[in-house]
Image (cartoon, rainbow, N blue to C red):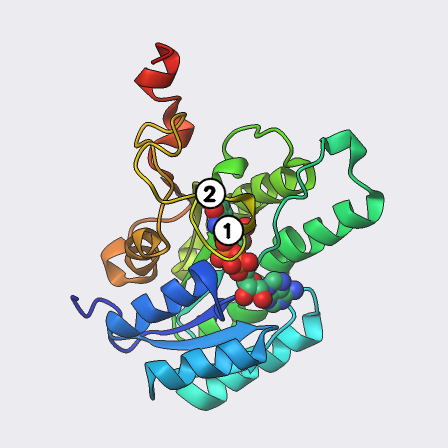
Amino acid sequence: MQQILEHKIVLVTGAARGLGAAYARGIVEAGGSVMIADLLAEDGVALAAELGDRAAFVTLDVTDPEAWDVAVAATVEHFGGIDGLVNNAGISATGVPAVEESIETFDRIIAVNLRSVYLGMRAVTPEMRKRGGGSIVNISSAAGLIGLALTGAYGAAKWGVRGLSKVAAVELGREKIRVNSVHPGMVLTPMTAPTGISLDEGAFPNNPMQRVGRPEELVGAITYLLSDAASYTTGAELAVDGGWTAGPSIEYVMGQ
Ligand SMILES: NC(=O)c1ccc[n+]([C@@H]2O[C@H](COP(=O)([O-])OP(=O)(O)OC[C@H]3O[C@@H](n4cnc5c(N)ncnc54)[C@H](O)[C@@H]3O)[C@@H](O)[C@H]2O)c1
């Protein structure tokens, strides 16, 4: 792979497994260094060991402002600074209608999936300023681009991530801190596996590509946005969803 992230230091939240682990692998393959930040210490430490010297692990609960300070300090101490942040950690929708979600669950999903993004941007910005710029990639969802049934709090959080990314992009542009949102479609990970989705062609007939995605298929979008190849890209939203949010597949529309 092209070394587009050579000398870049990136903190990825929720990187012990699933999509975050794929991003961590992709960052190291592209020549960068990665701080794997997650609640899952065992998985995170094992992944860091597998990836070698340009990877390390720090325990982080993304809902805890003080833990953010510790994670950022650990990254700076270990690697020498921070050029990139991928706000990826998240918890799934509960699959109940929005108005039937409990208040406690609603608040929890907002805290982990949206408030965390604010806390993360707030924590890394001083370090990015010291380096004269940076790139923040906030992971939203297809559910942050359309109204997806049974994703009330999740969808609200992901729309919030998209909006917050644009506000931060506008505010930080002059300081060369770029902020973009990425919107994965349905991807097979430990989060989505319990729903029984399969990678088989044709298994997702509503989707123009008619299949769900693999974590590796998101990596290029993330490494691109973190790299200097995206030096004029900020405030953008990138759907990586097999065309899901563009509209239903022609076969689905024609009832085939
Ligand atoms: N898989 C999909 O189809 C899909 C689609 C759209 C968006 N996304 C988003 O992508 C991101 C990653 O999803 P995934 O499918 O890899 O999920 P996953 O459940 O496989 O991984 C999520 C990771 O986040 C960590 N995490 C959860 N709460 C945390 C907290 N409070 N502090 C720190 N870490 C925490 C978990 O320990 C886990 O390692 C999420 O933000 C999710 O909403 C996923």
Could you tell me if residue 81 is visible in this image? no
Residue at 46 percent of width and 55 percent of height: 189
Q: Quadrant of the N terminus?
A: bottom left
Residue at 76 percent of width and 45 percent of height: 106
In the picture of the structure, the residue carrying the numbered disc 2 is 197
Secondary element at tag 1: helix
Residue at 68 percent of width and 43 percent of height: 94
In the picture of the structure, the residue carrying the numbered disc 1 is 193
Left or right: where 86 falls relative to 213: right
| Res 209 quadrant in image | top left
Q: Image quadrant of ligand 1?
A: bottom right
Residue at 42 percent of width and 78 percent of height: 47
Distance between the alpha carbons at the discs numbered 2 and 1: 6 Å
Left or right: where 51 falls relative to 128: left
Instruction: Tell which residue pokes out farthest to the left in this image.
Output: 2
- Counting from the top left corner in percent of width and height, residue 7 is at 28, 78
Q: Is residue 159 above or below residue 50?
A: above
Amino acid type shown at disc 2: Ile
Secondary element at tag 2: loop
Q: Is residue 220 above or below residue 247?
A: below
Instruction: Tell me whether circle 2 and circle 1 mark residues in contact (CB < 8 Å).
Output: yes
Instruction: Tell which residue pokes out farthest to the right in this image.
Output: 103
- Counting from the top left corner in percent of width and height, residue 158 is at 57, 43
Could you tell me if residue 91 is visible in this image? yes
Amino acid type shown at disc 1: Ala
Instruction: Classify 10 Å Cα crowding around label 1: few (below 14), some (14-19), many (20 and above).
Output: few
| Res 46 quadrant in image | bottom left
- Counting from the top left corner in percent of width and height, residue 138 is at 48, 54
| Res 147 quadrant in image | top right
Ligand 1 is within 8 Å of the C-beta of the residue at disc 1: no
Q: Nearer the viewer, residue 132 or 178?
A: 178
